[in-house]
Image (tube, helix red, strand yellow):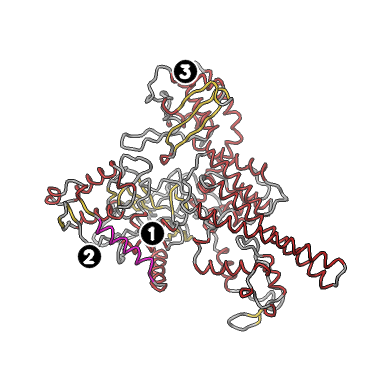
């Protein structure tokens, strides 16, 4: 159904106000996408959805940003208040100090335990009579619960513990499925008459289709993409395809086009959105919630489940990752005639928008998608799927990690087999064995064959001679292979790896009499490899090795790095370091965040202030101890208080130091990708339970919903 908005920009704001945003993982499965940064939020909906891959296939990191600048104003004020309360009074200006007569002993105790950057513990419940703030009624322990707690309990009661139910027959995903269909992007609304387009310094009134595509380019005018030849060439070709005959005859040179007035218009609209009143933003949020309530849920086997991505991406320009040959091409508007609807036979089929009809209505309970269509740029099939917290997604994840656990019990035999195959008389078997070695030891992706019009990214099976260099000795190591190629999403993979001598000799053999552009494994492809793997173990593919090695590495690293005597902050640093080892193994890189330097500067300033506070507290304690040696009971109490203040400040200092180390080490590593897609969540849950680390320190609310099954079933002694 088409939902009319004031403009595409308003659709943008509604999207940004959604509780969740979704993205695809390696398999094209939906996953949680991190909240946009300040820079990203400046982009309108149309621009922000022109994702780098063209189909949201990039695995995005999901990490909670703990920088003060990203917090809402209300949260920031609360945090500032908390910081003042947590500081020793000697470090607070006189005007900022609280009046002592208003502060109870319990509040002072709470202030001593608070930490300005972390909230490790919730305040204990009051054991005695408690007055309700608004009603004035007296609430006693054991009586009616507060509305907030009651709501939380109700939410917990509504959880569908599908993992405790009997499994359906193989191939059957659901028995009943009903939904309202997708929400289409709003129709294009022409620009106001005062927004001009010029060609060769002459004003041109564009037809509506041509104007719409022109706005896609105008929005991107300050992006690097518009400086790239491939982007501009592809855009011009596709733009001309929607022009009228007169426009085609006139507009032939992109360099003569002036989009500056359009660009200025969209900048102005963006500023207007940011300057919206609280009431206007609230109205948009309420409208968005209304749409989500109607279209964002489905009924499946008697349970209400959340849908992941019920809004269809609006038209725009394809970007692609790296130097994608199709960058700049037009992603056309998706209409009902493109959509295949999937629901059960006994459900109410969602009605298409007025004047339209669905391409097809299916009743296939062997698949998990609700709707699908084929996008026009790369010909890839897109799906509307359920939210990661749903049963269908959870079951798929559970099965994925169970298959990886199964590999753990078979891996020794598999390694023995492929090691023996290095000496095989058949070249195809030798190549397969060496490829398996790389996939196992280096967690390389298998790699698929690419067409000429796709980005030149490769995996293990599609490596070319030019992608590796062999060194019998390098930096004191023997039999070194240097890998240098573009992997998934055009991210560079560079690694210098000492390998087994037999592997090295085989690589020399594979490269003989070949040109740089020739295939390294010319007798192997992904299909052949996966067919062989399935014969070794049911369900085994190249990807299972990646999941297995990632989870195995995390478990071993956590065992080595975690000391039971660590503070919670130190344990979290150990967890992130274990996760970092996995991210490095899987080549999960990211660019240094734009706010990193500013964030580190702020953090170091906090550290300097905290170190000074510790130094002052040490002096105060020294004087207090001297006064208390032969002093009164009051002076002894003062010395005890000074010691507690020093201990609290030292704990805060330790947390800040750990935070500084963690943030610096993580600046180029994407931890969220492995945490959400490659690591068995039961390992993390078991670690939390074993070492008394709150699970919400590892997984945020959305992630806890996604891994609810793991949190419920994993005990402290779980082993992958």
Label 1 – label 3 distance at C-alpha = 54 Å
Farthest-out residue, right: 630
Asked if disc 1 and disc 2 are in contact, CB closer than 8 Å, the reply is no
369 vs 286, nearest the viewer? 286
Region in magenta: 260-276
Considering only order in the chain, which callout, 2 or 1, is on the residue closer to the N terminus? Answer: 1
For mark 2, what is the residue? Answer: 192
Nearer to us: label 2 or label 3 = 2
Q: Find numbered disc 1 in the image and state the secondary structure of the residue it sits on.
A: loop
Graded by Cα atoms within 10 Å as few (under 14), some (14 to 19) or many (20 or more), the crowding at tag 1 reads some
- The C terminus: image quadrant: top right
Q: Position of residue 325 (x, y in %)?
A: 31, 39
Q: Position of residue 139 (x, y in %)?
A: 66, 79
Considering only order in the chain, which callout, 3 or 1, is on the residue closer to the N terminus? Answer: 1
For the point 37% across and 51% down, which residue is it?
363
Does 63 appear above or below 619? above
Tag shown at residue 509: 3
Asked if disc 2 and disc 3 are in contact, CB closer than 8 Å, the reply is no
Nearer to us: label 1 or label 3 = 1
Q: Position of residue 459 (x, y in %)?
A: 44, 33
For mark 1, what is the residue? Answer: 42
Label 2 – label 3 distance at C-alpha = 67 Å
Does 613 appear above or below 664? below
């Amino acid at each position: 159904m088409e939902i009319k908005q004031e403009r595409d920009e308003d659709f943008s704001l509604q999207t940004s106000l959604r509780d969740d945003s979704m993205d695809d993982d390696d398999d094209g499965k939906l996953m949680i996408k991190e909240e946009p940064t300040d820079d990203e939020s400046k982009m309108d909906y149309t621009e922000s959805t022109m994702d780098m891959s063209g189909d949201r296939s990039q695995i995005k990191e999901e990490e909670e940003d703990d920088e003060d600048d990203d917090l809402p104003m209300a949260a920031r004020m609360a945090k500032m208040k908390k910081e003042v309360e947590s500081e020793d009074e000697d470090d607070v200006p006189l005007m900022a100090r609280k009046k002592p007569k208003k502060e109870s002993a319990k509040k002072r105790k709470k202030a001593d335990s608070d930490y300005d950057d972390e909230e490790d513990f919730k305040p204990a419940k009051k054991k005695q009579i408690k007055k309700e703030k608004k009603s004035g009624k007296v609430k006693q322990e054991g009586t009616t619960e507060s509305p907030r707690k009651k709501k939380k309990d109700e939410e917990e009661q509504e959880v569908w513990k599908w993992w405790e139910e009997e499994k359906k027959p193989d191939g059957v995903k659901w028995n009943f499925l009903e939904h309202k269909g997708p929400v289409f992007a709003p129709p294009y609304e022409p620009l106001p008459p005062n927004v001009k387009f010029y060609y060769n310094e002459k004003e041109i009134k564009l037809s509506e289709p041509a104007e719409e595509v022109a706005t896609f380019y105008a929005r991107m005018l300050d992006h690097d993409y518009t400086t790239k030849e491939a982007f501009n060439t592809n855009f011009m070709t596709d733009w001309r395809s929607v022009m009228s005959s007169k426009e085609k005859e006139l507009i032939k040179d992109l360099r003569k086009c002036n989009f500056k007035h359009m660009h200025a218009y969209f900048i102005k609209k963006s500023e207007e959105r940011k300057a919206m009143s609280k009431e206007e933003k609230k109205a948009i949020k309420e409208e968005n919630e209304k749409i989500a309530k109607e279209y964002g849920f489905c009924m499946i086997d008697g349970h209400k489940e959340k849908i992941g991505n019920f809004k269809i991406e609006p038209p725009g320009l394809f970007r692609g990752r790296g130097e994608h040959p199709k960058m700049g091409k037009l992603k056309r508007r998706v209409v009902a005639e493109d959509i295949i609807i999937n629901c059960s036979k006994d459900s109410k089929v969602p009605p298409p928008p007025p004047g339209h009809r669905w391409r097809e209505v299916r009743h296939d309970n062997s698949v998990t998608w609700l709707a699908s269509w084929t996008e026009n740029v790369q010909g890839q099939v897109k799906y509307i799927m359920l939210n990661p917290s749903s049963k269908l997604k959870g079951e798929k994840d559970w099965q994925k990690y169970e298959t990886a656990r199964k590999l753990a019990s078979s891996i020794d035999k598999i390694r023995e087999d492929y090691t023996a195959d290095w000496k095989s008389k058949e070249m195809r078997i030798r190549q397969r064995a060496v490829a398996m070695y790389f996939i196992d030891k280096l967690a390389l992706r298998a790699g698929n064959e690419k067409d000429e019009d796709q980005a030149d990214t490769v995996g293990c099976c599609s490596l070319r001679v030019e992608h590796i260099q062999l060194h019998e000795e390098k930096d004191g190591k023997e039999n070194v292979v240097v890998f240098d190629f573009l992997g998934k999403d055009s991210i560079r993979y560079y690694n210098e790896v000492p390998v087994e001598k037999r592997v090295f000799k085989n690589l020399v053999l594979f490269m003989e009499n070949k040109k740089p552009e020739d295939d390294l494994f010319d007798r192997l492809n992904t299909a052949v490899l996966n067919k062989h793997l399935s014969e070794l173990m049911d369900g085994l593919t190249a990807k299972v090795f990646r999941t297995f090695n990632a989870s195995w590495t995390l478990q071993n690293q956590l065992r080595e790095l975690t000391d039971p005597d660590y503070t919670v902050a130190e344990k979290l640093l150990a967890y992130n370091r274990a996760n970092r080892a996995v991210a490095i193994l899987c080549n999960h890189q990211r660019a240094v965040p734009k706010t990193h330097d500013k964030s580190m500067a702020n953090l170091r300033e906090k550290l300097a202030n905290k170190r000074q506070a510790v130094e002052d507290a040490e002096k105060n304690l020294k004087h207090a101890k001297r006064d208390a040696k032969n002093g009164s009971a009051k002076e002894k109490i003062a010395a005890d208080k000074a010691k507690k203040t020093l201990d609290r400040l030292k704990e805060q200092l330790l947390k800040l130091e750990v935070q500084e180390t963690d943030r610096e080490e993580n600046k180029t590593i994407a931890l969220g990708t492995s945490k959400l897609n490659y690591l068995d969540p039961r390992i993390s849950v078991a670690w939390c339970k074993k070492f008394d680390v709150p699970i919400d320190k590892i997984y945020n609310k959305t992630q806890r919903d996604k891994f609810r099954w793991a949190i419920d079933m994993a005990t402290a002694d779980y082993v992958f």
